[in-house]
């Protein structure tokens, strides 16, 4: 059974950085897409970033995090990381790792089969 587990969340001041990690029970390389989503209180879950399998992995980012967040995959460690810099209060949310195996990329959370439990990120002013 595939399991995803996030770590690295916490409390950080605005302008600071955090690095989230998603560990997979299976081979990370077997997933076509591994993505990060987030959900703030009272809001819908939204796409943040994804890494897409290919001869060379490609990455996709939401406009709100482009230039500040970096997603990367380490197949040897079966992890996908999200480096978050220049954090603001608007980044406060529960962050989820998600994965899908089929060869299509979507930003909708409904398209992802496997999910972690989430990790809280709180940015204080």
Image: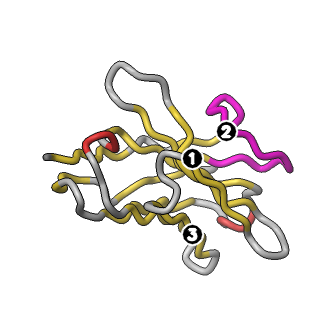
Residue shown at the point (64%, 61%) measured from the top left: 26
Q: Could you tell me how many numbered marks the image carries?
A: 3
Image disc number at residue 116? none
Cβ atoms under marks 2 and 1 closer than 8 Å: yes
Residue 106 part of the magenta segment: yes
Q: Quadrant of residue 27?
A: bottom right
* Residue assigned mark 3: 72
Magenta region, main secondary structure: loop
**Which tag, 1 or 3, sits closer to the chain's start?**
1
Q: Quadrant of residue 18?
A: bottom left
Disc 1, SS = loop
Per the rendered image, the range of residues in magenta is: 99-111
Q: Quadrant of residue 52?
A: bottom right
**Which tag, 3 or 2, sits closer to the chain's start?**
3
> Which one is in front in this view, the residue at disc 1 or the one at disc 3?
1
> Can residue 10 be seen from the camera position used here?
yes
* Residue assigned mark 1: 62
Residue shown at the point (23%, 53%) measured from the top left: 10
Q: CA distance from mark 1 to mark 3?
A: 15 Å
* Residue assigned mark 2: 107
Residue 101 part of the magenta segment: yes
For this view, does 104 lie left or right of residue 68? right
**Position of residue 41 measured from the top left corner of the image (x, y, whole percent):** 32, 25
């Amino acid at each position: 059974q595939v399991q995803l587990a996030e770590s690295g969340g916490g409390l950080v001041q605005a302008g600071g950085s955090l690095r989230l990690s998603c560990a997979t029970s299976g081979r990370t390389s077997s997933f076509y897409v591994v993505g990060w989503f987030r959900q703030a209180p009272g809001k819908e879950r939204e796409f943040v970033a994804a890494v897409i399998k290919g001869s060379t992995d490609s990455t996709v980012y939401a406009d709100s995090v482009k230039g500040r967040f970096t997603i990367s995959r380490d197949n040897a460690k079966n992890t996908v990381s999200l480096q978050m810099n220049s954090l603001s209060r608007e980044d406060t949310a529960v962050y989820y790792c998600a994965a899908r195996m089929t060869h299509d990329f979507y930003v909708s959370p409904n398209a992802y089969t496997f999910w972690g439990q989430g990790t809280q990120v709180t940015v204080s002013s």
